[in-house]
């Protein structure tokens, strides 16, 4: 894939903004007054769309870890994790298709919103689908070593992997302030995990850290790769791109069911162990996935990290009441350092 094309598009202008304007049929010609008014309206619409998607993603992300922990019974999952992931991908695919049907009825079928496509376009989607499968499975097992607030802290390692992979894959240069923000992020994650009441220095055991690092690498690579293929064709409807991504997600998760939980599903049933919390968790994961795709289409992966940072604080606050989580001084200081690192990263991005 030609990632340099994306870089060139960023230099020449914002193709996504142009795509939004074109999709609404706004003219590109006209007097200065009309041009300024159109530009102002476009910027306000774009800012509003980013704000809505980011806030939605923040709320969904903050409740994600809580729902996973809540879905446990006696410290274990009574339902099949692979079937839950399959239902998440199925729901995301169904929601994308429903959105497409609505668009077809309103605007008709066009070159940019039709499902039929070329092999070259579809062939890139299995890679992020497979990476997200492994990452999502690890997401369940990591809770054997961390609590919900600790999980949100460790998820901020995604910023490091995202930044490095942005530099390697998309050839985007990062400022010195942004690299300093990455170092602060590592310090913040470590500080938040300090445990002064135990012989262990860190609350999270070694296995938890290994899982968190693998998740960060998988999530970072999958996120950057998905953003690249989504933005490669800016005019392409996001629901079409989501549909094909989730189709492959369903296929890979179906394989996981057959290889990992086939006997359990045959003997106990597909929905064995499901509860209301499990259903809410699946709905949360599905909506979060769609929100992430919207962020990648109309913003970038860094905006996704902003929502994760705020979600970390919301998760800790809610966990105090739901699970009796003790907000230690180390966790508070680590959260503050992480928040500062995210702020510095945004400042560094503006000054590039």
Image (cartoon, helix red, strand yellow):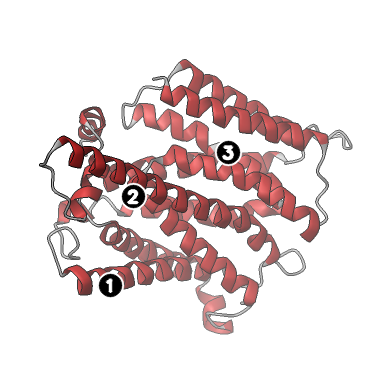
Instruction: Residue 127: give its label.
Output: 2
Q: Quadrant of residue 183?
A: top right
- Image point (73%, 30%), residue name: 191
- Describe residue 72's horizontal placement relative to residue 12 as left or right: right
Circles 3 and 2, Cβ within 8 Å, touching? The answer is no
Does the rendering let one see residue 146?
no
Could you tell me residue 45's position as x and y percent? 34, 49
Could you tell me residue 95's position as x and y percent? 38, 69
Q: Mark 3 — residue? A: 156
Between tags 1 and 2, which lies in front?
Answer: 1
Q: Quadrant of residue 192?
A: top right
- Describe residue 150's horizontal placement relative to residue 212 as left or right: right
Number of other residues with Cα within 10 Å of mark 1, as a class: few under 14, some 14 to 19, many 20 or more: few
- Describe residue 89's horizontal placement relative to residue 114 as left or right: right
Between tags 3 and 1, which lies in front?
Answer: 1
Number of other residues with Cα within 10 Å of mark 3, as a class: few under 14, some 14 to 19, many 20 or more: many
Q: Mark 1 — residue? A: 102
């Amino acid at each position: 894939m030609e990632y340099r094309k994306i870089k060139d598009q960023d230099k020449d202008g914002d193709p996504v903004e142009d795509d939004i304007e074109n999709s609404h049929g706004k003219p590109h010609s006209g007097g200065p007054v009309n041009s300024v008014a159109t530009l102002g309206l476009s910027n306000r619409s774009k800012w509003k769309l980013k704000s809505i998607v980011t806030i939605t993603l923040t709320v969904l992300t903050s409740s994600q870890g809580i729902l996973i922990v809540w879905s446990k019974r006696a410290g274990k999952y009574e339902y099949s994790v692979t079937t839950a992931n399959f239902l998440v991908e199925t729901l995301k695919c169904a929601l994308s298709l429903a959105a497409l049907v609505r668009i077809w009825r309103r605007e008709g079928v066009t070159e940019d919103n039709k499902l039929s496509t070329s092999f070259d376009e579809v062939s890139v989607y299995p890679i992020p689908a497979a990476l997200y499968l492994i990452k999502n499975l690890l997401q369940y097992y990591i809770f054997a070593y961390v609590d919900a607030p600790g999980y949100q802290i460790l998820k901020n390692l995604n910023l490091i992997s995202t930044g490095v992979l942005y530099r390697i894959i998309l050839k985007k240069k990062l400022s010195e302030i942004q690299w300093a923000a990455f170092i602060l992020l590592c310090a913040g994650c470590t500080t938040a995990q300090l445990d002064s009441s135990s012989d262990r220095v860190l609350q999270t055991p070694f296995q938890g850290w290994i899982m968190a690092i693998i998740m960060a690498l998988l999530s970072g690579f999958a996120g950057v790769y998905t953003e690249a293929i989504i933005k490669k064709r800016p005019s392409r409807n996001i629901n079409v791109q989501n549909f094909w991504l989730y189709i492959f997600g369903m296929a890979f998760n179906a394989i996981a069911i057959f290889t990992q939980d086939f006997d359990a599903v045959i003997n106990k049933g597909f929905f064995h162990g499901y509860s209301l919390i499990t259903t809410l968790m699946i709905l949360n994961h599905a909506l979060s996935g769609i929100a992430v795709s919207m962020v990648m289409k109309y913003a970038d992966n860094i905006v996704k990290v902003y929502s994760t940072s705020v979600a970390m604080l919301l998760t800790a606050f809610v966990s105090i009441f739901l699970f009796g989580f003790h907000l230690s001084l180390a966790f508070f200081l680590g959260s503050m350092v992480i928040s500062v690192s995210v702020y510095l990263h945004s400042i560094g991005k503006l000054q590039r």
